Every structure is written in structure tokens, then in C-alpha cells.
Image: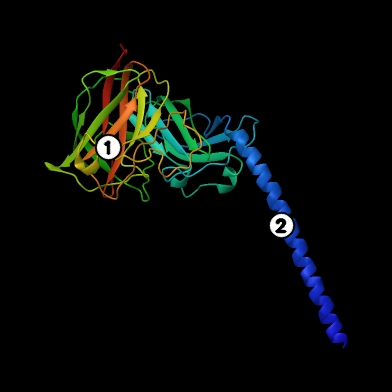
């Protein structure tokens, strides 16, 4: 009899613990959910970026750690980031002479510090090849908005950056660089050094006159050994990535290419340009999305973009064939609108 009474009270005690635990768990979840919603609303209003480097004085040819501290309008850590184009944060690096490109992400490195990211600190590693000024763009997305911020770093060293040179040719031999796995390539790429492992041929077709403020269609045609390439593959969830920078070095536009429908250059894939992203607001920053990406495509990729100001622009491209990442880069001149 006593054992039955003990079992009965033990059962009631267990039920009480479970109910109490569920109550406080739900209460805690509700509080966290409320804080999360409030915090997210604050974050969508503004993004502030501070850069800390190790070493503090960046030297050409030596590895540098770049730590981006993201905060919202209230100075709180900016952590509600969505994965977009397979990465949580994109860092684009362009040299002042528009000849060097880097495109890196925290996920590219085994030393990724997840705990620091909870505090809004996102880290990448990069070796600046020559001394001079570089522009760095940080590109992130939340459930409500996109943000792109840019800043500058000055690199010291004996090997100086070459002067900027204008090159408006429309056909080039470009080289593929063997990826480091998982769509990673963390090294700086110079558009003039020709140090890649595989040669390709690229022809870029653009209007003879490009005007500021007007949408322009630019076509890229890829071939190898005289044959069109029809088995290009997505790179970072896009047919092709672009970093567009003017000689003024006043910002970076990170945008993406589109695959023509059924191989016809004049017809674009008609799908939501924000496919794959849950957007509630129209992006107002330097990051554009276009079209969707089939498993294999080619030989043509199209870029649709608008240049806001007249001037000379370098259009850095980045796409993938087999395990090779290509960096086709072309320069265009943009005129004043009529």
C-alpha cells in the first residue's frame, strides 16, 4: 500500500516538473521571440561597419586578418543575417588601379569563429598583393532588407601598385583558377598576371554608347579551344557574379548575370529576380539579383545593369567551369544621359 502511495505522489511530482518546465520554456521562448522581432526591426534601419585588422598596419604580400564589426542603429550586434548566394557575408576587394579582385566570405576559412559572429564580428583572411589603396565592400542580407557598405584600406610595401590603364577591348583570353573546394577561391586575382591554370576565350558585347541612368544589356560568350562552352555551372548560386567599380573608386556594385532562355540572347529567363530570397522590401543598396540558375548552361551569360553616373567602369566577372573559376574583366565608358 505504501509503495502505491509513493508511486502516486512520485507520478504527480513528475507531472508538476514537466508542466513547470514547459511553462518556463514557453515563457522564455516568447520573451526571446519578442526580443528577436524588436531587435530585427531595429537592425533593418541601418548597418554600421567597423574594420579591425591584424596586423593593424597592413603589408603587401603578408596575410592579413580582416574583422568586420557589424552593428545596428543602436550600436547592438548585427546578427540576423540570411544566407544569400551560399554565404552569410560577402567581402569584395578591389585595388585602386582596378586590376586586382578578391571575393571572400567567413565560411571560406576553417578558422571561422561562430561565437564572435554572435557578437556581430565576421572574420576573413586576405593577402594584399601590392602596396596601395583598396576598396572593400561588405554585402549582407536580412529578412527585410539588403545592405552594402564599403570602406578603404591602405597597404604598405616595396612592391607598388601600377598606374590605372584604360583597356576597352571586347575579346580576351582569360584564365581559370582551380577552386579551393565549395566554390571557394580566397586569393587575390590580378587581371594582368595570367597565372591561372586553364586558358579560355571570352567575347563581351555591349552597346556602342552606354548612358548613365539607363538599363544596359551586356552579353558574354565563352569558348575554349575554338568550341562554345555549354557546361558552365553555377558559382555561389548564380550564373555569374559581377563587381562593378568606377575609376572614382566611390563604391562597388555587386550584381549577378542571367542565363538566356533556350540559348536566345534576346530572351531572358522570366522569373522573379529575387528568387531564393525572402524579401519584404526593395533593395536599396549596391547588390542586385537577376534571374535563376540552371544546373548547366552556356555559352552565353547576360548582365543587365544601370550605371548611375558617367565615367569609366571596370566590370569584374566571376563564374565557374568544372573546377575552374574564371575572372573575365572588361572596361566600359559611360556617357552623360541626354
List the single residue furthest toward the left. 226
Q: Quadrant of the N terminus?
A: bottom right
Residue drawn at 68 percent across, 52 percent down: 29
Label 2 belongs to which residue?
25
Disc number lying in front (2 or 1): 1
Residue 2, visible in the rendered structure: yes
Label 1 belongs to which residue?
268
Q: Residues within 10 Å of mark 2 (few under 14, many from 20)?
A: few
Secondary structure under tag 2 reads helix
Q: Is residue 276 above or below residue 9?
A: above
Residue 99, visible in the rendered structure: no
Residue 161, quarter of the rendered image: top left
Which is more N-terminal, label 1 or label 2? 2
Q: Is residue 110 above or below residue 23?
A: above
For residue 159, the mark is none
Between residue 301 and residue 164, name the one nearer to us: 301
Q: Is residue 43 left or right of residue 96?
A: right
Secondary structure under tag 1 reads loop
Residue drawn at 64 percent across, 38 percent down: 39
Measured from the top left, where is residue 240 in percent x and y? Answer: 31, 39
Amino acid at each position: 500500500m505504501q509503495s502505491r502511495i509513493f508511486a502516486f505522489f512520485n507520478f504527480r511530482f513528475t507531472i508538476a516538473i514537466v508542466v513547470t518546465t514547459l511553462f518556463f520554456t514557453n515563457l522564455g521562448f516568447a520573451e526571446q521571440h519578442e526580443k528577436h522581432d524588436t531587435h530585427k526591426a531595429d537592425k533593418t534601419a541601418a548597418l554600421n561597419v567597423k574594420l579591425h585588422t591584424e596586423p593593424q598596419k597592413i603589408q603587401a604580400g603578408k596575410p592579413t586578418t580582416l574583422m568586420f564589426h557589424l552593428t545596428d542603429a543602436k550600436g547592438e550586434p548585427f546578427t540576423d543575417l540570411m544566407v544569400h548566394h551560399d554565404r552569410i557575408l560577402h567581402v569584395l576587394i578591389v585595388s585602386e588601379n582596378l586590376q586586382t579582385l578578391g571575393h571572400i566570405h567567413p565560411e571560406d576559412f576553417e578558422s571561422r569563429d561562430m561565437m564572435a559572429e554572435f557578437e556581430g564580428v565576421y572574420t576573413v583572411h586576405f593577402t594584399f598583393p601590392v602596396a596601395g589603396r583598396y576598396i572593400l565592400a561588405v554585402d549582407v542580407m536580412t529578412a527585410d532588407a539588403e545592405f552594402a557598405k564599403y570602406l578603404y584600406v591602405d597597404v604598405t610595401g616595396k612592391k607598388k601598385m601600377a598606374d590605372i590603364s584604360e583597356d576597352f577591348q571586347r575579346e580576351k583570353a582569360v584564365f581559370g583558377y582551380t577552386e579551393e573546394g565549395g566554390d571557394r577561391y580566397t586569393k587575390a586575382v590580378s587581371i594582368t598576371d595570367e597565372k591561372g591554370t586553364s586558358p579560355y576565350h571570352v567575347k563581351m558585347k555591349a552597346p556602342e554608347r552606354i548612358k548613365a541612368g539607363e538599363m544596359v544589356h551586356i552579353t558574354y560568350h565563352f569558348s575554349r579551344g575554338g568550341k562554345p562552352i555549354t557546361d558552365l555551372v553555377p558559382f555561389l548560386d548564380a550564373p555569374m557574379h559581377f563587381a562593378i567599380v568606377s575609376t572614382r573608386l566611390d563604391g562597388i556594385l555587386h550584381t549577378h548575370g542571367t542565363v538566356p532562355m533556350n540559348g536566345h540572347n534576346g530572351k531572358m529567363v522570366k522569373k522573379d529576380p529575387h528568387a531564393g530570397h525572402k524579401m519584404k522590401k526593395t533593395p536599396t543598396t549596391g547588390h542586385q539579383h537577376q534571374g535563376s540558375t540552371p544546373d548547366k548552361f552556356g555559352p552565353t551569360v547576360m548582365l543587365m545593369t544601370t550605371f548611375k553616373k558617367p565615367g569609366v567602369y571596370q566590370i569584374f566577372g566571376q563564374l565557374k567551369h568544372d573546377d575552374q573559376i574564371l575572372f573575365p574583366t572588361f572596361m566600359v565608358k559611360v556617357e552623360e544621359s541626354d
